[in-house]
Image: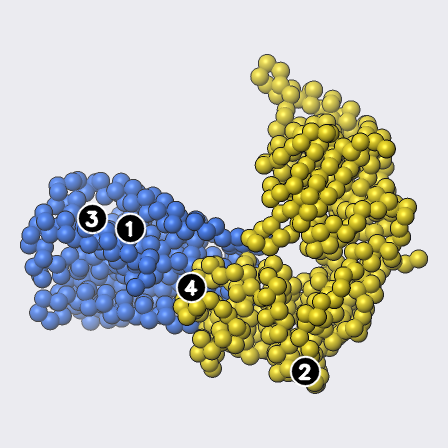
Amino acid sequence: MNRSLVPVLGVLAVLLIAIAFVNPNFVDPPVFLAFLKRAAPLALLAAGQYFVIASGEFDLSVGSLITAEVVIAARLINGDADATWWVIVLLLVIGALTGLVNGTITTRFGVPSFIATLGMLLILEGAVFLWTDGAPRGALSDEFRMFGRNNVVGQIPWSVVILLLLGVGAVLLMRSDFGRTLMATGDNARAAALAGVRVSWVRTTAFILSGLSAAVAAVLLGGFGGVSAQVGRGMEFAAITAVVLGGVALGGGRGSVVGAMAGALTVESLFTLLNLLGVSGALEYAVQGLIIIAAVAFTSRRTDEHPRPGRGIRRGRAHHSVLK
Amino acid sequence: MAAPLLAMRNVSKSFFGNEVLSGVDLDLRPGEVHALVGENGAGKSTLMKILAGVHEPDSGEIELGGEQVRFSHPSQAQVAGVAIIYQELTLLGERTVAENVFLGREPSRFGVIDRRKMETETTRLLEELGERSFTSRRLVRQLSVAQQQVVEIAKALVVDARVVVMDEPTASLADHEVELLYKLIHRLQARGIGVLYVSHRLREVFDLAQRVTVLKDGRLVSTTDTEAIDIPGLVRLMVGRDLESFFPPRESDIGDVLLEASGAGHRRLRDVDLRLHAGEIVGVAGLQGSGRTSLARALFGVEPFTTGEIRVDGRRTRITSPRRAIKAGLGYVTEDRKSEGLALRQQVRHNALLVAHALHRSAGVSVSELLTSVELTGGPDSASREVRFLSGGNQQKVVLAKWLAVRPRVLIFDEPTRGIDVGAKFAIYTLIRALSAQGVAILMISSELQELIGMADRILVMRDHRIVADLPGDSTEEAIMHAAVHEEAAP
């Protein structure tokens, strides 16, 4: 097994045992499956964010993208079951397009992704507010809500099945040519470009995958939690926290997608535990802040044992032109 | 004869097991200009950095004005009176001349920086240096390189430097500016300051220096009065070394033209005409900055040619990116393998297959076969180790494997054996030979003339961003150096 997974799986195991200790019901299959169902959107989002972070970038836009997607879906479906399918397709297209725009701005115009996607976050948030006047209208159909709410067979929820399928897909993707070039890009973009990797395209693809993961997460969250202008708020930070907790070094080229998803389960189980212990939900952000700082400190301690000369883009003028 | 101002005795330094300086002696008298010359990689800059306190020597002693010193930080060297003027100037562009001159030791009055004192002192220093073309209040970024050098020197005077080290100071100066620099150096001499002058330009050595020290492969070759030697003699000292029987014999037949450039050029490179034949090894010699690496990068599409044409296998090909170059059958082993050749935190396996992955091609052989073919040593699990844990020689073999996986027809090597040990060097030479025997055309850039003579069928010499000579592979080092430094060598 990949050694970078050990810490996150250790923490996850400790938290799950602690939850089971406080709430013995937790080990019952339905309760545990409900936990997974709740964690599925964040785990998918973490997988999407993983691609972006592994390539050496950030995607801060996914939280408000989720909100926008849910609000759009509610408005367009407006309770009409027949609209469900084309709206889901449309959501995926919007997710992919947002990623394409983020990627293009970052790689072609040389805007650091931190700024590009922060801008996208604000733009989407503003657009949603403008369009809804702060109060989303319309309603999702039951067919739409099925994915976030219902079970496929017996006690197995749709979200868990979707999470498993897409999770396996992400693992396979990382083992493909694309995954290898993605890791090489995050590790050393110059070397990757000189080896024939289309660095800009690889990074843009990572943003598209992140946008798609936000679209799927929006479908699940819409079904699970319903329509509001707050549904995706803070999800981008939760996803980044999850990825970092999963042993993925910021700056790229390190860690595994399984680690990122395990990180999401860890974040979710921590919130569950805090909830069980009666800690106010308002503290969630503060806890996330602590985790993200601690996790990054931990990973950089581990990775700085062997400082890397030539890391990044030594002779580069602009962020995006890795070769000139 | 004056007592030495500076004496370095038996100074040695190794980096990661590679000895780059071994038992070097050097002394500098007050008011003397002492030139330090040698081929690239001879150890000049390491010696300079030891003097500057950037590196600590592993052994040996340094005496400054009769006192033994040991620098573990550049600031200590500065306080002791050693000023270094690097090739790349280190001034702050957005600050004034005076602020730069007094950087880090600003005079203060009542706890506030005393600007007036700074400015009058700087003006006085500039006058002493005969500089009237700018004032102490000018922003440094508005100055020319030559003017900035004056500021650097003023900076050295303000701390009462006794030893000034200059690293290739004329590299980016126009002719008339060089004259001004000479005058400046004479003024430093008149003040009793010792100048250690590092330069490739032998003409300047004879113009300025009283003595010249030659380094080669980290060892002292000689220290001579410049009156007792001439340029050809100095060149011989710089390159002369017995050819070890180090290079595997050539076995290939030279075939058809595989890569051809005619009239190719861009912003910096001019009139590149070259032909590489199948099975041929063509060397490229030239001093640092002569355009050798630019040539490799242009051929490989990193900074593509904008004029002329390139033919691969007789077919006209536009190579506008590395990806296109690779698709046309080229490969490029870069000079700096850590920053350009490898993804250090990825496994050996993934690095070896990176080009194949990028092109969605199969390597056709297993990773272990690929690694065996480059003689990667290091145990059965070596394929899954992260590349950063490998030795320099093994890292270079991984770079080579990366290219072999896609079977290139033309391979460009830029300093293929820099920083690797002797055993790995031999392995790399053998691999290059084997590739050429298979009909791969090879362009090999190197600062080690021996390596070029030992390996190449022909040697192109570059100077001032042009190919200035096309010499046979069995040329002497003197002949190559003469072509590379033509301006000095001319009678």
In which quarter of the view is residue B59 placed? top right
Task: Tell me which label, 2 or 4, sits earlier in the chain.
Answer: 2
Residue B378, how many percent across, how many down? 46, 67
Whole-angstrom CA distance, mark 1 to mark 4, is: 32 Å
Residues packed near mark 3 inside 10 Å, few (<14), some (14 to 19) or many (20 plus): many
Residue A115, how many percent across, how many down? 44, 49
The hue of chain B in the figure is yellow
Task: Tell me which label, 3 or 1, sits earlier in the chain.
Answer: 1
Q: Are marks 2 and 4 on the same chain?
A: yes
Q: Are marks 1 and 4 on the same chain?
A: no
In which quarter of the view is residue B235 placed? bottom right
- Image quadrant in which the N terminus of chain A is located: bottom left
- Reading the image, the residue beneath label 1 is A238
Q: Of helix, strand and loop, which one carries label 1?
A: helix
Of marks 2 and 4, the one in the foreground: 2
Q: Is residue B72 left or right of residue B343?
A: right
